[in-house]
Image: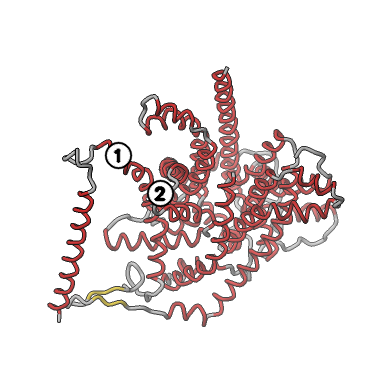
């Protein structure tokens, strides 16, 4: 569909993109404001950033969130990839419908419902078995449950378009199904695995509602700390923290996208060379 | 009496046990005759190996996503109690091994008698509905415009749309507050331009809640719409034009029906989470913007009335079954078509 796009459409597109970006840019601008009054421009300053480095509450919460994020995204990529393989490769099995439903539902399920139901499960489990105590473990489990859904969707669409002929060739040459998959198809879906790891990481890092429900005393993630501060009003050090997070995540996503695209191009070129 | 009961239970157990044994012998009979030691490890793996792949995610999601709903359902019939966990047991065992089930329907009755729940349900649905419409009105032209650009521009524009989705949701809502606050950028600019003489009250209004939802959920609308619009065959539109149909007519007769799966998927991706939205009405809305997510949160953390909160969640879920099923239907269709 490559033709002239009407100016009206372009202007709506620009308005939409502006709606998405102006608040973020303004926030970053405010974070360099020397004045504590957010409405007055008091000159350029990086003071709020240095103040962040001395805020133990925020640093502790950030460290907890990062740890949770790494464990969650690794777990979710493993489970989600297995689920995607199940759905794409095993067309018929009992409980297929169940798996499909459980993979799609977390994407639209309001977080508050997931959070409440999971909390009730954890509380009942603790009551019955003495495990798990609310905190790191419960947050990790709850996050893996919804991140798995995102991973599965991402990997599933990638697996569907993957070419199976190489894998079949490997199996004809005597490789077992697992070995054939790992050697041929896995490198092909690796970009999808990497991007879904990153996606799970950012989703986990960002989650407020589910964490608030399933967390226990002493385990406050970064979004929980930010939320409790923001509820009281705008504060300049949160501006700095928010800008930092947004820029870091944005840079990571852009870099990862760039490298994945490059790897993909190399792979395609290799494939073309091999065909000659 | 107690003995009779245990006797019956015992008989049941024996029956179950013998049936299991029967099944086992039947299975044993189907083994290949030649290999009297039973199937080898490799053969077993070949036949059942796929369950090693299917079971881990299936069991995990079953235990930690689906079964929690059963717990919520059970607890919604409990009573509050001053203890840990703060609700009574539904099932109790009396000394003579009777299992008692105490169902308390009061929580659900309470939902109907206390108006706050009904009103907040309706209010949430209304807010989510109109936000979805506005998202659609803004997102459709955006997706359409992106679908009509060249492939390389498309990927850049898509990245621009997706990038906010990757960055923090909470922080973006907070960023919006920086603009619409009484002393925020918007008011400062309007005052400076002389358009207004007193700062507008935007924060803590319904308008702010709408703005927040649209701002946060717009990418969810654009992406599925783009996915369907991109696949649209332009020759269909050319054919419509050749047959004398004006562009608007071709749009209504061709483009719109063909992009219906995207419209529904996008709308559901905005509508369903928006109903349960908690962060936006709490940070941007006023006391009037009592959405169901806020009510649930307060019931849980404020009143610590877990059974009523569970009942609210279950009732909420029942309302969502229709939209979720609709979304599932269209999204699986789209995924299988791609």
Task: Determine the CA span between mark 2 and mark 1.
Answer: 31 Å
> If the image is split into quadrants, where does the N terminus of chain A sit?
top right
Q: Residues within 10 Å of mark 1 (few under 14, many from 20)?
A: few
Q: How is the image coloured?
A: secondary structure
Question: Where's residue B38, x and y in %?
Answer: 20, 41
Bin the neighbour count of mark 2 within 10 Å (Cα to Cα): few under 14, some 14-19, many 20 and up.
many
Q: In screen coordinates, is A257 left or right of A15?
A: left
Name the mark on residue B208.
none
Q: Which mark is residue A140?
A: 2
Q: Mark 1 lies on which chain?
A: B
For this orientation, the residue located farthest to the left is: B3
Q: Which of A148 and B312 is in front in this view?
A: A148
Disc 2 versus disc 1: nearer the observer:
1
- Quick check: can you spot residue A72? no
Q: Where is residue A45 in the image (x, y as percent from the top left)?
A: 65, 39
Pinpoint residue B278: horizontal percent, then vertical percent: 56, 61
Is residue B98 shown left or right of residue B257? Answer: left
The chain carrying label 2 is A
The correct choice, above or below, for B8 with respect to B156 in the image is below
Instruction: Identify the element where label 2 is drawn.
Output: helix
Residue with the mark numbered 1: B45
Residue shown at the point (41%, 42%) measured from the top left: A82
**Compared to B257, does A68 lie above or below?**
above
Q: What element carries label 1?
A: helix
- Locate residue B25, reporting x and y percent: 19, 53
- Figure quadrant of the C terminus of chain A: top right
Quarter location, residue A215: bottom left
């Amino acid at each position: 569909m490559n033709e002239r796009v009407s100016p009206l459409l372009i202007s709506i597109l620009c308005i939409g993109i502006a709606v998405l970006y102006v608040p973020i840019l303004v926030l970053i601008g405010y974070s360099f404001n020397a004045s504590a009054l957010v409405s007055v421009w008091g000159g350029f300053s990086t003071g709020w950033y240095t103040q962040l480095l001395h805020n133990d509450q925020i640093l502790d919460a950030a460290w907890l969130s990062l740890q949770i994020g790494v464990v969650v995204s690794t777990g979710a990529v493993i489970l989600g990839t297995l689920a995607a393989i199940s759905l794409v490769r095993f067309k018929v099995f009992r409980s297929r419908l169940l798996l499909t439903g459980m993979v799609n539902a977390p994407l639209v399920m309001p977080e508050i419902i997931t959070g409440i139901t999971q909390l009730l499960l954890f509380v009942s489990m603790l009551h019955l078995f003495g495990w798990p105590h609310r905190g790191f473990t419960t947050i990790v489990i709850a996050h893996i449950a919804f991140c798995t859904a995102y991973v599965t969707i991402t990997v599933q669409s990638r697996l569907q378009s993957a070419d199976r002929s190489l894998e079949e060739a490997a199996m004809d040459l005597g490789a077992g199904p697992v070995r054939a998959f790992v050697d041929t198809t896995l490198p092909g879906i690796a970009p999808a695995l990497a991007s879904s790891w990153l996606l799970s990481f950012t989703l986990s890092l960002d989650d407020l509602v589910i964490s608030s429900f399933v967390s226990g005393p002493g385990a406050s993630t970064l979004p929980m700390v930010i939320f409790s501060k923001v509820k009281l009003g705008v504060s300049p050090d949160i501006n700095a923290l928010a800008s930092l997070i947004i820029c870091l995540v944005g840079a990571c996503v852009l870099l990862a996208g760039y490298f994945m695209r490059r790897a993909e191009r190399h792979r395609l070129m290799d494939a073309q060379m091999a065909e000659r | 009496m107690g003995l009779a009961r245990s006797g019956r239970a015992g008989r049941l157990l024996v029956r179950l046990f013998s049936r299991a044994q029967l099944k086992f012998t039947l299975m044993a009979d189907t083994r290949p005759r030649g290999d009297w030691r039973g199937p080898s490890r490799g053969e077993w793996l070949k036949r059942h190996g796929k369950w090693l792949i299917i079971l881990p995610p299936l069991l995990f999601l079953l235990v930690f996503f689906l079964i929690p709903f059963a717990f919520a359902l059970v607890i919604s019939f409990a009573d509050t109690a001053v203890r840990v966990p703060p609700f009574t047991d539904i099932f109790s065992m009396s000394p003579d091994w009777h299992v008692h089930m105490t169902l308390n329907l009061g929580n659900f009755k309470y939902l109907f008698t206390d108006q706050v729940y009904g009103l907040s349900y309706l209010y949430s649905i209304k807010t989510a509905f109109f936000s979805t419409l506005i998202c659609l009105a803004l997102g459709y032209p955006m997706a359409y415009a992106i679908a009509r650009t060249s492939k390389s521009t498309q990927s850049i524009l898509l990245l621009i749309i997706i990038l906010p989705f990757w960055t923090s949701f909470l922080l973006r809502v907070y960023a919006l507050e920086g603009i619409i606050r009484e002393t925020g950028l918007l008011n400062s600019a309007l005052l400076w331009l002389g358009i207004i003489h007193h700062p507008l009250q935007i924060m803590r209004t319904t308008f702010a809640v709408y703005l927040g939802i649209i701002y946060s959920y717009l990418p969810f609308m654009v992406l599925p719409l783009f996915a369907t619009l991109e696949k649209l065959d332009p020759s269909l539109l050319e054919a419509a034009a050749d047959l004398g149909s004006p562009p608007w007519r071709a749009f209504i007769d061709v483009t719109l029906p063909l992009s219906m799966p995207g419209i529904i998927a996008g709308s559901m991706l905005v509508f369903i989470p928006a109903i349960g939205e908690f962060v936006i009405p709490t940070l941007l809305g006023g006391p009037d913007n009592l959405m169901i997510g806020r009510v649930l949160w307060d019931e849980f953390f404020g009143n610590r009335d877990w059974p009523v909160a569970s009942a609210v969640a279950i009732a909420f879920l029942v309302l969502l079954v229709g939209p979720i099923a609709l979304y599932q239907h269209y999204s699986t269709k789209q995924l299988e078509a791609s």
